[in-house]
């Protein structure tokens, strides 16, 4: 035998660290991951509790046929079930799209900062990331520069994680029309805004719109995501994704949530509306504290602050977990705060006020 086991691994795998955001099992308020802080929809909880023995003992549907039908009805715009691909979270769909369309050595282009898994999945799939910084005066797509990259995959995130900002329809259409390769529009936060690219799928065979049941739908622990595209593109991503990716219990809960009714889809829509209303109240409180959150179109806000990491650590000491970034592209250090029930928001803001006062007094005594 020669070399270590580590040496046997693919270079892309050796180069990538495990995903390790700050954990906080002891935290009473965890607003760090943009999930639904009101919890699971009641219809999903009932489906979970009522799942029969066979749902665990037998394999699920090969490619989630029933789920795809329900998703097609939900997204509207004339989308048919054959245009939907379902996965183990939308992460799975994004990863499979790269496997399907990203020949090793080809480019994936995207604006930064964006969803942290994109460069990770890109590199793991042998792709070369091309990162284009956002212009912070507009937070819109630099459409020309994205097109100039002539990438196999152009990834757009709207609303964008972690900035929460939206993109203009004009720039989005320019990229979708002009791109040589496929365009992926990640709409993980679609339910918190009134714009979508799903209507463009009918006229653009190379467009994939991904969405998830992890955010507004409150099912992050069950791992269900999907993509919407032309039948050809969806079929290719489905080949790359492979069978049995949505487990049987998750599919049952997803179907219950996507069903019309007070405990399913209506619950999701009502809580998304509540999140939108609460994000306005939260942004106002943060501004009163002298902070400058970016304009949000999602269920979280990003607050650039030079001492973001220290603030995040001090909040964690007080049992509150936010996502603290040390150095985001364009934004620098920043805190990402998920929007949830107002009492959690006031607990957070009260603690933040104390922490800011301490940090400012430290700063002035130096
Ligand atoms: C949370 C998130 C996802 C991943 O969601 P899963 O469906 O849970 O894998 C994808 N894209 C963005 C931008 C996200 O913020």
Image (cartoon, rainbow, N blue to C red):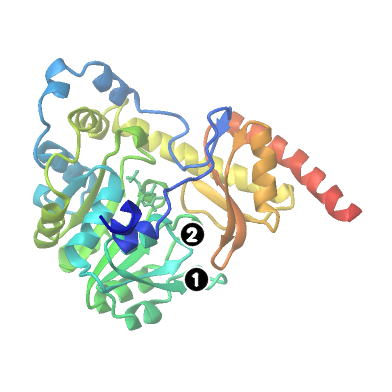
Q: Which residue is mark 2?
A: 165
- Label 2's element? loop
Front-most of residues 212 and 326: 326
Asked if disc 2 is less than 8 Å from ligand 1, the answer is no
Q: Residue at x 28, y 63 (%)?
A: 184
Asked if disc 2 and disc 1 are in contact, CB closer than 8 Å, the reply is yes
The answer to whether residue 342 is left or right of residue 171 is right
Q: Report crowding for label 1: few under 14, some 14 to 19, many 20 or more residues within 10 A (C-alpha).
A: some
The answer to whether residue 21 is left or right of residue 101 is right
Whether residue 125 is situated above or below residue 241 in the rendered picture: below
The answer to whether residue 276 is left or right of residue 11 is right
Along the polypeptide, which appears first: circle 2 or circle 1?
1
Q: Residue 164 appears at what percent x and percent y?
A: 49, 55
Whether residue 38 is situated above or below residue 235 in the rendered picture: above
In front: mark 2 or mark 1?
A: 1
* Number of numbered callouts drawn: 2
Determine the image quadrant of residue 126.
bottom left
Q: Residue at x 68, y 32 (%)?
A: 318
Whether residue 327 is situated above or below residue 128 in the rendered picture: above
Q: Residue 129 appears at what percent x and percent y?
A: 36, 70
Q: Which residue is mark 1?
A: 134
Q: Residue 101 appears at what percent x and percent y?
A: 19, 66
The answer to whether one can see residue 144 in this image is yes
Q: Which mark is residue 183?
A: none
Q: Report crowding for label 2: few under 14, some 14 to 19, many 20 or more residues within 10 A (C-alpha).
A: many
């Amino acid at each position: 035998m020669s070399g270590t086991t580590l040496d046997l691994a693919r270079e892309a795998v050796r180069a990538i660290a495990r995903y390790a955001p700050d954990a906080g099992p002891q935290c009473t308020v965890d607003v760090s991951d943009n999930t639904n802080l009101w919890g699971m929809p009641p219809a999903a909880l009932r489906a979970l509790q009522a799942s029969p023995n066979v749902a665990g003992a037998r394999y699920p549907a090969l490619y989630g046929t029933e789920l795809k039908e329900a998703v097609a009805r939900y997204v509207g715009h004339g989308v048919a079930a054959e245009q939907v691909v379902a996965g183990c979270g939308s992460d799975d769909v994004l990863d499979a799209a790269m496997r399907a369309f990203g020949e090793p050595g080809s480019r994936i282009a995207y604006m930064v900062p964006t969803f942290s898994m994109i460069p990770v999945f890109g590199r793991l799939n042998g792709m070369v990331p091309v990162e284009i910084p956002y212009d912070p005066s507009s937070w819109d797509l630099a459409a020309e520069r994205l097109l100039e990259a002539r990438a196999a995959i152009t990834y757009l995130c709207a609303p964008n994680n972690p900035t929460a900002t939206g993109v203009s329809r004009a720039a989005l259409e320019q990229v979708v029309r002009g791109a040589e390769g496929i365009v992926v529009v990640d709409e993980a936060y679609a339910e918190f805004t009134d714009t979508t690219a799903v209507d463009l799928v009918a006229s653009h065979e190379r467009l994939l719109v991904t969405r998830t049941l992890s955010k507004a739908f409150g099912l992050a622990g069950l791992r269900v995501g999907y993509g919407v595209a032309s039948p050809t593109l969806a079929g290719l991503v489905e080949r790359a994704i492979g069978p049995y990716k949505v487990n049987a219990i998750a599919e049952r809960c997803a179907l219950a949530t996507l069903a019309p009714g007070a405990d399913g889809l209506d619950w999701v829509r009502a809580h998304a509306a509540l999140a939108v209303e609460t994000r306005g109240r939260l942004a106002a409180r943060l501004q009163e504290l002298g902070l400058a959150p970016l304009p949000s179109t999602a269920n979280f806000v990003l607050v650039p602050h030079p001492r973001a990491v220290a603030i995040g650590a001090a909040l964690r000491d007080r049992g509150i977990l936010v996502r603290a970034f040390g150095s985001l592209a364009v934004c620098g250090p920043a805190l990402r705060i998920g929007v949830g029930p107002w009492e959690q928001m006031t607990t957070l803001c009260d603690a933040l006020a104390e922490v800011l006062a301490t940090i400012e007094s430290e700063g002035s005594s130096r």
